[in-house]
Amino acid sequence: MTKTDLINSIYKNLGLSKKESAVIIDELFEIIKETLEGGEKVKISGFGNFVVRQKEPRKGRNPQTGDELEIDARRVVTFKPSHVLKRALNE
Amino acid sequence: MMNKSDLIEVLAKKMNLTQKKSESVINHVFNEMTDTLKKNDKIEIRGFGSFTVKHYKPYTGRNPKTGDTIQVKEKRLPFFKVGRELKKRVDGDADR
């Protein structure tokens, strides 16, 4: 499933034009991205939570050369599925 | 923190939709995504990320607190891989 499939599904089921559906889907994901960019988490009940986590710097290795290198501190997005979603996948 | 109601409100405002319409869009999107994962299909939202389902075979594990052996049933779990654009934006455009 891609964004196009979501747009088509909205268009077919919710009485919006194809163009409107496309703009709305883009905006929806843009809002989520902006929120995460601001370091805030996004909780979608029944689906899951998108959380921004701060990772500390650590030592790693270049897997090709074996050289040791410093991995910088960084911020990453993680997804924690809700119990509802986990249950749905195991029914 | 932003929850689903906040998301409904923000989307409604930005797109000039009624709360009700915005709510049905958001519910529809996440229901479709759930159905897709239920069918073991992959979801790919460019710039945002992708979702896949991983299968785990049943295995014998231990309760880490008591040390008792337990049978862990076969299970399926969703996984999210963050897209390149979102990854960069969250990390403050760091070049890596």
Image: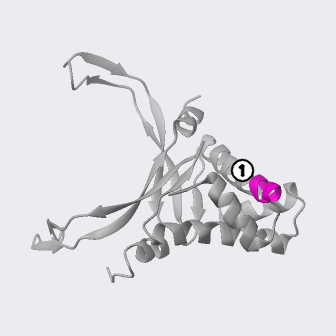
Q: Amino acid at mark 1?
A: Asn
Question: Residue sitting at 40 percent across and 31 percent down?
Answer: B57
Q: Quadrant of the C terminus of chain A?
A: top right
Question: Residue sitting at 71 percent across and 55 percent down?
Answer: B26
Establish if B22 lies above or below A18: above
Across the whole image, how many numbered discs are drawn on residues? 1
Residue A15 placement: quadrant: bottom right
Establish if B17 lies above or below A90: below
Asked whether residue B20 is drawn in magenta, I would say yes
Establish if A72 lies above or below B63: below
Q: Who is closer to the viewer here, B7 or B31?
A: B7
Q: Find residue B90 and report its horizontal and vertical position in percent.
A: 42, 72
Describe residue B9's horizontal placement relative to residue A39 as left or right. Answer: right
Q: Find residue B45 and report its horizontal and vertical position in percent.
A: 59, 65
Describe residue A82's horizontal placement relative to residue B28 as left or right. Answer: left
Establish if A53 lies above or below B27: below
The magenta span reads B19-24
The residue to which callout 1 is attached is B27
- Coloring basis for residues: one colour
Chain where mark 1 sits: B
Describe residue B61's horizontal placement relative to residue A88 as left or right. Answer: left
Asked whether residue B95 is drawn in magenta, I would say no
Q: Find residue B7 and report its horizontal and vertical position in percent.
A: 64, 60
Residue A55 placement: quadrant: bottom left
Question: Residue sitting at 60 percent across and 49 percent down?
Answer: B41
Describe residue A81's horizontal placement relative to residue B10 as left or right. Answer: left
